Every structure is written in structure tokens, then in C-alpha cells.
Image (cartoon, rainbow, N blue to C red):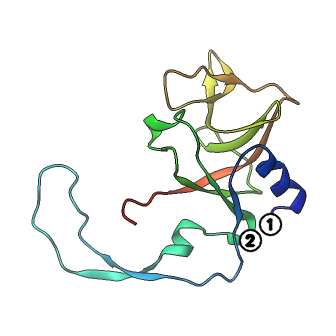
Amino acid sequence: MLSAEKIAKLRAAGLEVHAMASGASSVRLPLYLSPVQAGLPAQAGGDLDAALDLGEWLVPYPEHSFLVRVKGDSMVDLGILEGDLLVVEQGRKPRMGDLLVAEVRGQFTVKQLGRHRGKVALLAGNAAYAPILVVPGEVRVNGIVRSVVRRYAK
């Protein structure tokens, strides 16, 4: 769970932060066996596999998670758009390729952990943004992005 101090710091940086409530109500929805085609149309299947608990699927560790809303366009090529909600999990060591919420010289950002010219870097999902080299003491990981939530209809 995020400390009150960390929540205040994130909010002071202009981030909209929501802590995840443990014991939150679950939402179980039917999950169909047949996937939907994103290319040429295919015959629809009506077989149900099971019910999927959306909360457990999106937020497997609510006691170590928080939500933050995305501002900006640095991750659009990775499918993260302004206004999306990120489910961020704390307490796990980041691996190359993970999407992170990190503090860089006092500013918060979402980037992908990777390499640039052989050095560890935070990489944007938009060619308009330069990589940020990871310098000890200047970059602090706040959590790993576990899920992205986007609503299309209100």
C-alpha cells in the first residue's frame, strides 16, 4: 500500500493517484472460448469458457497496487494514451522490457525499461522522445505497470 507521504508526493507532481482498496468488490463477466478477430471477420463462437473476475485479472495484488492517470503522448506507440489509467504494482524488481512508473530528477514518468547504446535506459513509446539513461540516484522506480484501463463509452 502506498504511504500517505508517497501519495502526497505523486499528487504534488500533478498525478491523479488512487490507492487500490483491498477487499474491493469483484466483477465476474462471461469469457467466451472463441477470440474475436482483429483482422478479417470470422464466424462467431458462442461457447462460454468460464467467468472472468476482472478485478483479479487486472489487479492481481491490490494491496501493493495503485492507479495513476496518463498525461502526455510519450507512450502512444505502445498503446498507452493520454487519459488511460495505469494499474501500478509495487514490490517487484523490474526486468528489461517492463513498463515502469519512475521518478526522474523529481519528475514522474511512465517508460519502458530497456537499453540504449548498451546502457540501461527508460525508453519512450514515441520516437519524438529521447531515451533517459538510468543514472543511480537520479531515477527511482515507483512500480511496474500491470494493466492499462481505457473506457470508450460513457
The residue tagged with tag 2: helix, strand or loop? Answer: helix
Identify the residue shown where x is 77% and y is 57%. Answer: 91
Identify the residue shown where x is 43% and y is 61%. Answer: 151
Nearer the N terminus, badge 2 or badge 1?
A: 1
Quarter of the image that includes the N terminus: bottom right
What x and y, as percent, mark residue 96?
Answer: 63, 37
- The answer to whether marks 2 and 1 mark residues whose Cβ atoms lie closer than 8 Å is yes
Quadrant of the image occupied by residue 152: bottom left
What x and y, as percent, mark residue 136?
Answer: 85, 28
In the image, is 100 to the left or to the right of 63?
Answer: left
Question: Front-most of 101 and 6?
Answer: 6
Residue that mark 2 sits on: 63
In the image, is 154 to the left or to the right of 138?
Answer: left
User: In the rendered image of this protein, does residue 71 appear above or below residue 131?
Assistant: below
Identify the residue shown where x is 58% and y is 39%. Answer: 97
Three-letter amino acid code at disc 2? Answer: Glu
What x and y, as percent, mark residue 4?
Answer: 87, 62
What x and y, as percent, mark residue 26?
Answer: 55, 83
User: In the rendered image of this protein, does residue 113 appear above or below residue 15?
Assistant: above
In the image, is 74 to the left or to the right of 132?
Answer: left
User: In the rendered image of this protein, does residue 43 appear above or below residue 102?
Assistant: below
Quarter of the image that includes the C terminus: bottom left
Quadrant of the image occupied by residue 111: top right
The residue tagged with tag 1: helix, strand or loop? Answer: loop
Three-letter amino acid code at disc 1? Answer: Met
Identify the residue shown where x is 82% and y is 30%. Answer: 105
Residue that mark 1 sits on: 1
How many residues crowd mark 2 within 10 Å: few (<14), some (14–19), many (20+)? some
